[in-house]
Structure formats: structure tokens, C-alpha cells
């Protein structure tokens, strides 16, 4: 009547987990070896692959997240983000390749990994008849945190996510956003070294999002945590992540800082916004001519809706952006344009993301042919 | 991410008291604080589940239902037994009759089921009610990925839930049977003999196993079926089918396979077949075993296989079986029930271990 003692999660991996350590020929070895005294990345994957029958959910993923950084995993629904996360937690076994989380193989030693990794699943749920605090208490017990320590920790994390006022209400009275906050608190209860957040801010209101992102930054700064977050909310990822990985159809098609990604996927074009007062169509035409005449300017877009909106000027190569801005000021002075403002436009992640995905789709099409 | 590399955060939780000997595996990145190794995650799960069960509305409802199911026949049986007790000689097993005696009520002499019969009918509900949503309920609530991302083994979840279910069942049937026994002692004024008490305890164990079977069956449903409402429907459907219509259906099948015609020996063979088919139902196994365990006058569970057997049975001098003889008689039934329970749980276990976390 009691359970068999076999524990398949652990059992299977014996052959597999250490595989790539023992046969170096199969894949190029990672540059950092045992003797290296640089701190190793808390999250590392080499050729991590997950297949469901014919479908390749994750395709040879090489990923590294350092301590003290927030890494954003971007991708459409079904791109393989969640599958990757489940493999990192040892909740799903990789078909191929390996992962190391806090230096351990999650498929082989899931318990040690899960003890040190806080995880917020997408569409997180709680026991609805228990209060938020009781839910966290259960998590603390599962982590074998001594009772007193657990109580102080729970108070702290509830405070951090801004739920103190509602902590003792049953969670079925919580809004979606509050559940998500509680989910983040839940991931923090075990005082993790690594935090993995799957769509952490989807249901939280804009002000709340700022608070949460602020909290994540604090955690990274003060505790040297490594945070991996997946999202499809590009502006949030852009605002909080140190590095970004773009995921499409199970492949990481690009990773790096915003600047690196902009460099790689942008068409080497920078944009400048200029506010110019014009009285009529003739005036607008003149503005266009003046701007076009500046060397480096490849594109001039007049405001569409009202004349008070800024003009958008495309510059290529992107490195000429500062020079072009100066030229615009000079041109305005010499030609008597009614210039009200000039400012550079930060490269948008949306743009980069769109390009990256398109590029990947192209590349894929070529491969197939 | 070294221990000295990161300052202890002002806002963060304080580090845990370090255990004496940190175990560091090769290649592991040292943790900022030592953590005690969690053991027996199933105990934590079971404790939480048990607390949930005991505070739940279904616990109260089932307690009342099972209690009433036992008390109503008990009341009438007690009256009948009390009036008969004085005329019975050799009152060795009068107290235990409280549990198997099917009283006749009112002027019309309507036969009520015995305490044992009523409990056998209602007890499966107990098992089903505490299991039908145990896994798919977690899925629906979205708590399963969160639970599994804690440092416990995956089977700790299903083991803990099963253990909690067993505990609740033990509590409910233990209390109900205890109350019946107490009531019987007061109302009848008869204190059970040691052998009767033993019979009662064995029967209690048997009932526990039987309800555990339904618990395991409910758990299997909760693993296999995605929606809790569906698994509840299937579970209660199976309960109705097995315990109420089960006899009818097996009669139909038996009648089809071996009609009750022909010579006397052929008819006896048909009855034998009918009994065998009946024993495919866990309900039958439980009823046979519990009758024998409770009533020392019952000396066989099967009909005789030959005409001579029938004659012998008629000529037999009525006597009481000793407890060990009764037990030997129902040993196959008990083993079959245990096997069914284990099989159900094993399938549930394997399916659960292989399921994807998200689905």
C-alpha cells in the first residue's frame, strides 16, 4: 500500500548527467575549466535540447547567466522558454546536452538545485482556502526552514512585495496581480541564490511592475543573486535586464546587452527626434530638404498627426548619430528653422526583437531549402 | 557567488544557523548559507493535507453520513438483540451480532441492512471524497509546479497525499466503530469477550483496507483525469455500479455464460461461476470477508461445489468458528483487496511520475 521506493527522477540520469564531462570529443569544451578562478556562472547550459517526439521544443541551447545579473529570456508563446526553465529546475529531463545550475546537474540532483533556486511559474497558483502567509509557511516547511527563521523571512518577503496588508486573507480573495506578487515572495522564502521567474509581471499594474522590477534590481545588487526571467513584455525586459536572450522556435537566436543586440540586429541605423515648427506644407517641404541635406541622414519622416509632433530622422551609420545631431542644430541656426527640440531615440527592443525573429525565420527558411 | 563575496543583505532573510558539517560536492557553487538536508518531504505534504482534510467541509459531511449510516441500523439491531439475548444460550458472540445482524423494522417487518452492510455501502464514498481531486486539483489551482519546485521528490507529493487520506479514513471509521461499540455496550449491557473485540478490530482493519482501495482508485482518477469534476463523476459512477448495480450486472453476465438450467450438478456449477464472477467486484470481497470475520456462525464463503456438499452442509451441527479459522476462510479475499489497492496506487504512482509538470 505504501509507495515503491524507486524514485525515477533521480534514477535515470546516472548515465546521462556526467556524459559530456567524460567525453570531451562530442562538443567543444567550455572555455572555463576547473582551474579557472573566475566565479562560475550559476546557470550554464551546453547544447541543451528537449524533444517531444517530432517537435524540438528547445534546440541546442547555450546559455549563461552570471551572479549579479538579470537575464531576460524573450520569445513568443511556445518558443521554448518554459521548457528551458523546467529543465533548469530538473522538472523535465533534457533529451540531450546538459545544464548546470549552481554548479549542479538539475537532472541528477534536483533536490539540491531546487533548494537553492527560487521559481515563479507562469500563472502561479496558491491554495485558495489558505491565507497568503499560510501558503508561504508551507513552502518554508517544504524547504525545512526552522520555524522562527521562517516567520521572520516570511514577514520580510511579504513586506518586500508589498502584500503586508493582505497577508492574512485567504488567497481566493486576491487579484491576479496580488497572486503574482505572492508568487515572487514564495520564490524568495527559501533565500535562493538563483531566481527563475516565468512571466513575473504579466498581471501586475504598471506602478506595481515598477516596484517589482526595483525589487529585482535590489536583490541582484545586494545579494548577488542571478535572475533569469522570461517575458514577452519587451519594455519591461528592456528596462530591467542586464542581458537579453532572444528565443525563437526553440533556438536562442541572439543574446547580449541591448547595445550588442542593437548592433547585431539593427540595420546600423540610429534615430533622432526633432521638434520643428512649420506653418504650412511649403514650410514642411523646406524642413525636409534642409534635413535631407545633412550628410549621414538617410531618412526623414514628417510628423503624421500634428505639426507639433517631432520629425524622425534616420542616421546611418549609427555611430554618426552625435555628429548629425550637431549638424541639425547648426543647420537650424543657419537656415532659420524653428527648432524646438532634438533628442536621440533609444534603440527599441521591439524593433530589435522583430528583426531578430525575422532574420531567424529567414535563416531557417534558407536552411530548409 | 562565494560566501565572502556577498554582503549579508539588510533586507534579506538572516542566514540559517549552519549545521556542523557542510557537504560540498565537486563542482558545486558554494551557497551563501548552509542548508540542512530536507528529508521525508512526504511527511510535510501529508501533514498539510491532513490539516486541510480535517478542516474541510467534506470531512464534516462524511462524518455525519457515515455516522448515520451506522447508527440507524444499530439502533434497531440493538433492540432486536436485547429482546433475543435472554433466550439465547451460550451467548458467546452476542455483542458482535450488533454489527452483522440485519434488523426487521415495524409491523411490516422491513429488513434493514446491518451496520456492516450500511458501512460497506457508504464507506467507499469516504475514500473517493478525499482522493478524487488530490492531483488534478493541484493542477487546476496552479499549485503543482510550485510544489514540485520545492526541494522534495516528486513521489513525496503523491505519497504524502495518500498517507493523509489513509489517516483521515482511519480516524473516521475508527471513531464511528468506536461509538457503535460504546453504544452497544451501554444499550445491550453486554461487554464484548476478548475474541469478539479481536474480531471487531480485524473487521475494522478490513474496512480500512477496503476504503483504502477506494482512496487509491480516487487517486488514480485524479492523476489520469484532467478535471476534478470529471474524476468525481467517474468515481461516484464506479461506486454506484460496483456497490449497488454490481450484483445485478454480474448476475446478467453469469446468466449469459451459464444459465441456471440442466441437471442439479449443472445448476450448481452455474452458481459457482456466478460466485466467481461476483468476486471480481471489490464490494463482494469486502462483504464476504466482513461477514465471516464478524459472525462466527458463518463457516463458508462459497456455495458447495457438489450435491453431496449441500447435503453435508445441511447436516452440519451449528457451531461457532474460532477466530483463526474465520480468518483463514477469508484470507484470499483480504489478499485480493490489498492487491487491488496496491495495484491502483502503483498505476497512479507511475502515471504521476511520468506526467509532464505542465500540461
Image: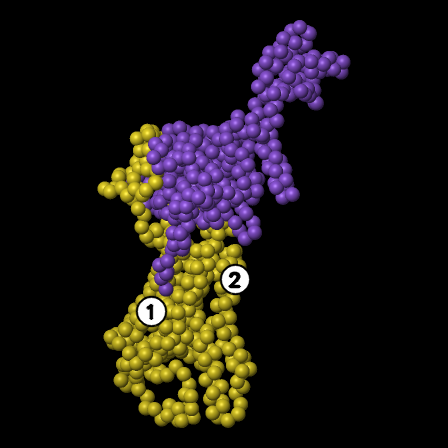
Which quadrant does the C terminus of chain A fall into? top right
* Count of numbered badges drawn on the protein: 2
Rendering colour (chain A): purple
Q: Chain of mark 2?
A: B
The vertical placement of B22 against B283, above or below, is above
Mark yes or no: residue A2 visible. yes
Q: Could one spot residue A310 in this view of the protein? A: no
Residue B233 circle label: 2
Which residue is nearer to you in this view: A312 or A48? A48
Pointer 1 residue: B205
Q: Quadrant of residue A269?
A: top right
Instruction: Estimate the x, y position of residue B262 in percent, counting from the top left.
Output: 53, 92
Residue A343 placement, left or right of B161: right
Q: Chain of mark 1?
A: B
Label 1 environment density (alpha carbons within 10 Å; few <14, some 14–19, many ≥20): some
**Cα distance in 3D space between marks 2 and 1:** 28 Å
Pointers 2 and 1 in contact (C-beta within 8 Å): no
Which one is in front, B21 or A45? A45
The answer to which of B303 and B183 lies nearer the viewer is B303
B292 left or right, relative to A46: left
Rendered hue of chain B is yellow
Q: Is residue B270 left or right of residue A153?
A: right
> Which residue is pictured at 46% across the width and 59% down the height?
B351
For the residue pair B331 and A3, the one nearer the viewer reads as A3
Tell me which residue sits at (52%, 56%) in the image.
B227
Where is residue A299, by image quadrant?
A: top right
Residue B139 x %, y %: 48, 51
Q: Residue at x 30, y 42 (%)?
A: B24
Amino acid at each position: 500500500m505504501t509507495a515503491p521506493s524507486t524514485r525515477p527522477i533521480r534514477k535515470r540520469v546516472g548515465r546521462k548527467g556526467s556524459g559530456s564531462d567524460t567525453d570531451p570529443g562530442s562538443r567543444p569544451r567550455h572555455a572555463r575549466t576547473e582551474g579557472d578562478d573566475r566565479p562560475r556562472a550559476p546557470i550554464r547550459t551546453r547544447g541543451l535540447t528537449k524533444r517531444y517526439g517530432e517537435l524540438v521544443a528547445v534546440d541546442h541551447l547555450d546559455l549563461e547567466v552570471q551572479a549579479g545579473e538579470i537575464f531576460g529570456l524573450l520569445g513568443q508563446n511556445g518558443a521554448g522558454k518554459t521548457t528551458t526553465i523546467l529543465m533548469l529546475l530538473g522538472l523535465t529531463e533534457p533529451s540531450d546536452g546538459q545544464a548546470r545550475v549552481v554548479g549542479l546537474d538539475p537532472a541528477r540532483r534536483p533536490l539540491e538545485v531546487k533548494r537553492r533556486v527560487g521559481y515563479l511559474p507562469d500563472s502561479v497558483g496558491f491554495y485558495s482556502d489558505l491565507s497568503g502567509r499560510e501558503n508561504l509557511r508551507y513552502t518554508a516547511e517544504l524547504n525545512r526552514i526552522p520555524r522562527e527563521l521562517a516567520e521572520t523571512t516570511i514577514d520580510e518577503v511579504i513586506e518586500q512585495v508589498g502584500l503586508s496588508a493582505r497577508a492574512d486573507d485567504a488567497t481566493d480573495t486576491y487579484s491576479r496581480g496580488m497572486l503574482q506578487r505572492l508568487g515572487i515572495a514564495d520564490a524568495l522564502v527559501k533565500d535562493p541564490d538563483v531566481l527563475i521567474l516565468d512571466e513575473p509581471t504579466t498581471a501586475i499594474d504598471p506602478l506595481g511592475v515598477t516596484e517589482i522590477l526595483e525589487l529585482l534590481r535590489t536583490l541582484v545588487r545586494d545579494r548577488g543573486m542571478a535572475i533569469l526571467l522570461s517575458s514577452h513584455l519587451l519594455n519591461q525586459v528592456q528596462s530591467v535586464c542586464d542581458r537579453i536572450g532572444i528565443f525563437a522556435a526553440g533556438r536562442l537566436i541572439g543574446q547580449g546587452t541591448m547595445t550588442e543586440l542593437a548592433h547585431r540586429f539593427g540595420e546600423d541605423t540610429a534615430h533622432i527626434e526633432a521638434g520643428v515648427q512649420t506653418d504650412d506644407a511649403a514650410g514642411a517641404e523646406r524642413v525636409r530638404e534642409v534635413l535631407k541635406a545633412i550628410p549621414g541622414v538617410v531618412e526623414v519622416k514628417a510628423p503624421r498627426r500634428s505639426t507639433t509632433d517631432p520629425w524622425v530622422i534616420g542616421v546611418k551609420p549609427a555611430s554618426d548619430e552625435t555628429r548629425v545631431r550637431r549638424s541639425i542644430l547648426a543647420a537650424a541656426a543657419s537656415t532659420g528653422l524653428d527648432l524646438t527640440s532634438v533628442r536621440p531615440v533609444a534603440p527599441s527592443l521591439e524593433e530589435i526583437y522583430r528583426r531578430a525573429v525575422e532574420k531567424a525565420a529567414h535563416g531557417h527558411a534558407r536552411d530548409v531549402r | 557567488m562565494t560566501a565572502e563575496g556577498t554582503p549579508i543583505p539588510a533586507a534579506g532573510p538572516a542566514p540559517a544557523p549552519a549545521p556542523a558539517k557542510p557537504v560540498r560536492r565537486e563542482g558545486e557553487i558554494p551557497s551563501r548559507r548552509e542548508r540542512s538536508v530536507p528529508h521525508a518531504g512526504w511527511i510535510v505534504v501529508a501533514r498539510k493535507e491532513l490539516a486541510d482534510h480535517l478542516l474541510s467541509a467534506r470531512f464534516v459531511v462524511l462524518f455525519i453520513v457515515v455516522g448515520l449510516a451506522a447508527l440507524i441500523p444499530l439502533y434497531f439491531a440493538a433492540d432486536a438483540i436485547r429482546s433475543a439475548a435472554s433466550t439465547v444460550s451460550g451467548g458467546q458472540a452476542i455483542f458482535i451480532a450488533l454489527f452483522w445482524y440485519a434488523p426487521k423494522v415495524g409491523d411490516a417487518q422491513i429488513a434493514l441492512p446491518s451496520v456492516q452492510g450500511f458501512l460497506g455501502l457508504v464507506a467507499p464514498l469516504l475514500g473517493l471524497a478525499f482522493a478524487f481531486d488530490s492531483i488534478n486539483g493541484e493542477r487546476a489551482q496552479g499549485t503543482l509546479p510550485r510544489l514540485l519546485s520545492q526541494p522534495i521528490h516528486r513521489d513525496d507529493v503523491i505519497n504524502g497525499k495518500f498517507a493523509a487520506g489513509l489517516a483521515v479514513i482511519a480516524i473516521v471509521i475508527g471513531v464511528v466503530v468506536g461509538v457503535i461499540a460504546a453504544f452497544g455496550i451501554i444499550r445491550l449491557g453486554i461487554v464484548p469477550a476478548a475474541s469478539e473485540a479481536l474480531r471487531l478490530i480485524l473487521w475494522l482493519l478490513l474496512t480500512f483496507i477496503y476504503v483504502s482501495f477506494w482512496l487509491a482508485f480516487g487517486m488514480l482518477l485524479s492523476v489520469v483525469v484532467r478535471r476534478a469534476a470529471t474524476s468525481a463523476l467517474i468515481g461516484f459512477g464506479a461506486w454506484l455500479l460496483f456497490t449497488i448495480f454490481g450484483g445485478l450486472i454480474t448476475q446478467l453476465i453469469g446468466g449469459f455464460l451459464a444459465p441456471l438450467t440442466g441437471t442439479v450438478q449443472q445448476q450448481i456449477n452455474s452458481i459457482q461461476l456466478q460466485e466467481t464472477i461476483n468476486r471480481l467486484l471489490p464490494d463482494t470481497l469486502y462483504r464476504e470477508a466482513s461477514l465471516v470475520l464478524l459472525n462466527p456462525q458463518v463457516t463458508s464463503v462459497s456455495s458447495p461445489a457438489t450435491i453431496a456438499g449441500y447435503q453435508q452442509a445441511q447436516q452440519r451441527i451449528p457451531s461457532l468458528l474460532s477466530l483463526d479459522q474465520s480468518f483463514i476462510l477469508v484470507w484470499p479475499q483480504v489478499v485480493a483487496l490489498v492487491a487491488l489497492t496496491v495495484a491502483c496506487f502503483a498505476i497512479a504512482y507511475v502515471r504521476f511520475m511520468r506526467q509532464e509538470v505542465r500540461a
